[in-house]
Image (cartoon, helix red, strand yellow):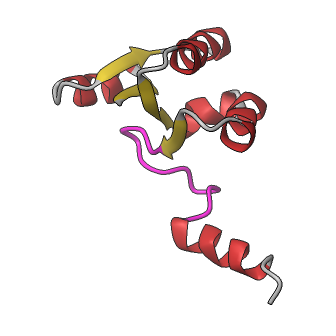
């Protein structure tokens, strides 16, 4: 399984120094091309995409997350930090637990 990072050039540089494949993108069309590459490549099992880039193509990211089995998409902060309006992992877990019927 391979990992790919879709993000801004600085974030991609940091991951590429660790040997991870990256796609530096700017704008909606480049993000969509990078996502299509990841979905079409059977070797890619994990996509790390910056929160800001994921927000630009939210419906496409959600479609991949909720309807496809591969690749797994994880949103990460970029070099400027996490988006303040994005819920934390703990908040997401609590909101999911609230929807579970016992």
Could you say which is closer to the camera, residue 13 or residue 79? 13
Kindly indicate the quadrant of the structure image that contains residue 86: bottom right
Q: Please indicate whether residue 49 sits to the left or right of residue 12 in the image.
A: right
- Residue 87 in percent (x, y) is at 62, 63
In the image, residue 26 above or below residue 49: above
Q: In this view, does 78 lie above or below 6?
A: below
- The quadrant where residue 54 appears: top right
Instruction: Check the image and report above or below for 97 versus 33.
Output: below
The residue range painted magenta reads 76-88
User: What secondary structure do most residues of the magenta stretch adopt?
Assistant: loop
Residue sitting at 83 percent across and 84 percent down?
Answer: 101
Identified at 42% across, 15% down, the residue is 24
Residue 54 on the magenta span: no
Instruction: Point out the image quarter for the C terminus.
Output: bottom right
Horizontal side, residue 22 vs residue 39: left or right: left
Point out residue 46 in the picture as x, y percentages from the top left corner.
44, 35
Residue at x 39% of width, y 26% of height:
4
| On-image quarter of the N terminus | top left
Outermost residue on the bottom side: it is 102
In front of the other: 71 or 88:
71
Residue at coordinates 45% horizontally, 45% vertically from top-left?
A: 77
Where does residue 65 sit, x and y in percent of width and height? 66, 41
In depth, the one of 30 and 79 nearer the eye is 30
């Amino acid at each position: 399984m391979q990992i790919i990072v879709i993000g801004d050039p600085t974030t991609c540089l940091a991951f590429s120094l660790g040997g991870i494949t990256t796609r530096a993108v700017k704008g909606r069309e480049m993000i969509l091309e990078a996502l299509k590459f990841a979905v079409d490549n059977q070797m890619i099992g994990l996509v790390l995409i910056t929160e800001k880039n994921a927000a630009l193509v939210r419906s496409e990211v959600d479609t991949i997350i909720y309807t496809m089995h591969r690749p797994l998409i994880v949103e990460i902060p970029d070099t400027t930090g996490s988006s303040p309006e994005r819920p934390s992992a703990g908040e997401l877990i609590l909101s999911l637990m609230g929807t579970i019927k016992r």
